[in-house]
Amino acid sequence: MTGPITLTWYGCDMRTGNIVEDLPSIKPNGALSRRLGAQTTLQLDLALDGAPAEWESATAPGRTLLVAVDTLTNTPLWGGPVLTRDGGNGDSIQLGVATMEAYLDARYPGTQTLIGADQASVVTALVTPALASGPPIVIDAVATGTAMDYLTYDGDDKTILSCIQEIMGMEGGPEWTIDIAWNANQSGIQFPLRVRQQIGVQSPNPEAVFDFPGCISDYTYAESYEQGKGATRVIARGEGEGSSRLTSPPQEALALTSLGWPVWEYRYTPSSGITNPDQLTAHAVKSLALMNQGGQVWSVQAVASRAPRVGVDWGLGDSIHVAVDHSRRHPTGRDLVARCWSWELDAGADTVRPILVEEG
C-alpha cells in the first residue's frame, strides 16, 4: 500500500491504554523509530494553540502514553510512556516519550529460579511481575522448543529489561519485541510483548521490495571490522577482577582463521550479575556468529509515500527485498534479502528508513 503517511496522535491512560484526548497540535522533533529488543525515544512539541482543554491530563509524565496512528490505515505505529514535560511562558510544551521497553527498565523480576524451561516460558516468567499495576502489556510468547536454565536474585537489582536482553544475547536466544495495537473495541491501545525464535516473517522472496532507482532515494551499504563489530575470537567475562573473574572459553571462527584470516580479539561483559559460566559461553558463541565477518548493514532511505508501508507491508524482523539496478557503489547492481532490525519514519519529510542486516 502506498500514499502519504499522516499521523494522528492520541494521549492515553497508561494503566488502561484508553484514549484520553486527540492531540492534533503535536509535532515530533525527529523521526519515529523502533528496534528489536530495545527502547527508542522521541521528543515532541505540543503547541498550546490548538491543544484540547484536557491536554495536561493527557500528557502527564508517568501517568500517560502518547500514541501515533497511521491515519489512512488506522494502524498504530509507535507509542509509549511520557517521561518528561517542560514548558513555561512559551507557545508550546516539550514532551519526552520512550517506547514501552523503557517501562521494563523500571520493573524488577524478583528472585526466580527457572530450570529446564522453554525460552519463551523464561521470558514470560520474568516479565509477569510488570503486569501487576502496570500498563496493558499482553504477553504473546510462542514456545521455541529450546530449554534453558536462568537464575536471577532480587538483590542483584537487575531490571526485567536487562534480564530479557541478556537472554536474547545468548547463543540460540529468542528474539522479542513490544508491538503496539488497538484493544478489542479500538477504544485504546495495548502492547503485545512477542517472543519468538525469530521475530517477524522471514522469506527468501518477500513481498516488500525497495528498489533503486525507484522508491529508494538514498542508500548506504556499511561494512565494518571495527572493535565491537568484527572479531574472529571472542571471550565473554563476568564481573570481578583478576583470576577470580568468571570467563568463557575463547570462541574462535576456525572456518576463517584456518583459511588465513588474522585473529581479531574481542572481550566484553555481556551484562551485570552473570554467575553461570554456561551463560557467558552462550553469549560469546552468539557474538562470534554475529561478528566473525564484520558488520554488513544497509541503511535505506525511501520516499514513504512510494515505498512499501511500514506496519502494513513490513515490520520489525521481516525479510525485505532490496533491488539495486545500478549505482556508483554497485555498478552492476545488487539484489539481496535482508532482515529489518530497526526502522525510522519521518512522516513530515515523507521518508522511511529501514535498517537492514544481512545474515548468514
Image (spheres, rainbow, N blue to C red):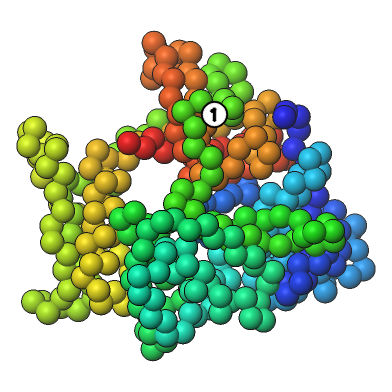
Image height check: is 181 above or below 318? below
Can you identify the residue that label 1 sits on? 206
Report x, y in % for residue 72.
Answer: 81, 39
Seen from this angle, which residue lies furthest top? 332
Question: Relative to the observer, which residue lies in front, 99 or 146?
Answer: 146
Q: Quadrant of residue 81?
A: bottom right
Report x, y in % for residue 185.
Answer: 84, 58
x 48%, y 18%: residue: 324
Image height check: is 342 above or below 191? above
Image height check: is 264 above or below 213? below
x 64%, y 28%: residue: 307
Seen from this angle, which residue lies furthest bottom? 155
Quarter of the C terminus within the rendering: top left
- Residue 85 seen from this side: no
Report x, y in % for residue 316.
Answer: 55, 45
Q: Amino acid at mark 1?
A: Pro
Q: Quadrant of residue 295?
A: top left
How many residues crowd around disc 1 within 10 Å: few (fewer than 14), some, or many (20 or more)?
Answer: some
x 24%, y 54%: residue: 285
x 47%, y 63%: residue: 120
- Residue 79 seen from this side: yes
